[in-house]
Image (spheres, rainbow, N blue to C red):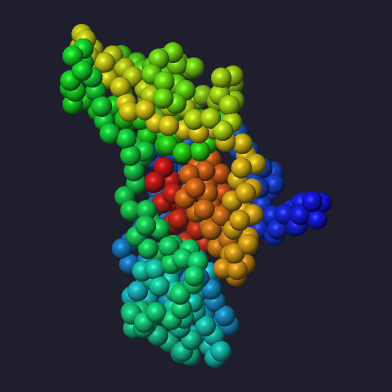
Amino acid sequence: MKKLILLTLFCVSMASISYAQLTTSLDLNSPFEFSNQSSTTVSANASAPADVIAVISLKGKVRYAKPGSRKFKKLKEGAILDKMGRIKLKKNSELRYLRNGSVQTFNSKGKHSIDKFPFNELVEKSEDDFLSYLTSASGWGGPGRRDGGQKDTTENASGHGEGVKLNGYSPKAGKWHAGPMIFKWTTKSDNGFVLNIYESGKDENPIFSKKTDANKLMIDLSKIKEMKAGESYEWQVTKDSGVEGVLLRSDKVEITVVNKSEGMKIITALEQSDDFKQLSNWQRDLRIAREFEASRFYSDAANTYKQAAGKYPNNELVQRVFGMFMERM
């Protein structure tokens, strides 16, 4: 048993982002807000072009000239290339890149127009589809959806909808840490709102209720004594429409409270994959973040994406993937 524990600890320590590192470098109890207006860096990179060409790895001397420029500059991993630009390779140099989900290699010495690269021929394909995912349509996430997939609902005294939108979009349905969290909804009101949190499946007697005039409210979930790790809850926002007998309410959004230690299980499982071991550090960081997101561990995903963006400020691919995550939230 002791050997098993030591082996597990060793495996976790080999990840580029271990759970211990996350909790040390980031305050996971600080509220992570997914706002309509992201930071300048994220906003600039959030919209991904339909045809993305991203540098995955480099060998030797590889330089890049932007469209219309004669000056070749040293290329870096994670760079996003314009297909109208040019590439210059020295002898024994190699460029591995992604385009439309295909991982390909180019190693011809000399200057080359990127639009002449053999993009249609798949050179390699990893059993782990993470690298392909990065430049696929699903990887970029498409148009951001901040409504958590919830439909707009209203109700009057007779139970009929009035067509007025009230939509809660953050936090979205998934697994979250019990800590400060910013709840947000799309509609503003002169009549104020009421945020209610219920035990999952129960429509009466909320365990938390608070009024506010704004369309967002920060709540420290760890202060709600009825909330327990491993249990699910539903949040909903309501408001008086100003019309007698008409109550506007959002659909309920179910969230599950999880302990921070739950994320370690995901990291440990990833490290058993041979494909994961072959990734570079920044790719491992994104891989962990992606796995958190796919498993709906959104607190862990948000912090891991955020840390990766901070660690690699000049990596365009990291910044774009982080930006698209913010859009999806």
Could one spot residue 53 in this view of the protein?
A: no
- 4 to the left or right of 160: right
Residue 71, how many percent across, how many down?
45, 78
Query: In the rendered view of the protein, which quadrant contains the C terminus?
Result: top left
Extreme residue toward the top, this view: 244
Q: Residue at x 56, y 33 (%)?
A: 230
- Residue found 32% across the figure and 35% down from its top: 150
- The location of residue 208, given as percent across then percent down, is 48, 17
Relative image position of residue 51 (x, y in whole percent): 33, 67
User: Hey, which quadrant is residue 93 in on the image?
Assistant: bottom right
Using the rendered view, name the quadrant where residue 205 is placed: top left
Residue drawn where x is 62% and y is 49% of the image: 265
Task: Kindly give the residue lying farthest to the front in the view shown.
Answer: 1
Depth order, front residue of 240/159: 159
Q: Position of residue 227 (x, y in %)?
A: 56, 24
- In the displayed structure, 161 sits above or below 103; it is above
Does any portion of residue 77 appear in the rendered image? yes
- Residue 242 vertical placement versus 130 (above, below): above
Residue 37 against residue 305 in the figure, above or below? above
49 relative to 19 in the view: left or right = left
Q: Residue at image x 46%, y 38%?
A: 174
The image shows a total of numbered marks equal to 0
Residue 96 vertical position relative to residue 224 in the rendered view, above or below: below
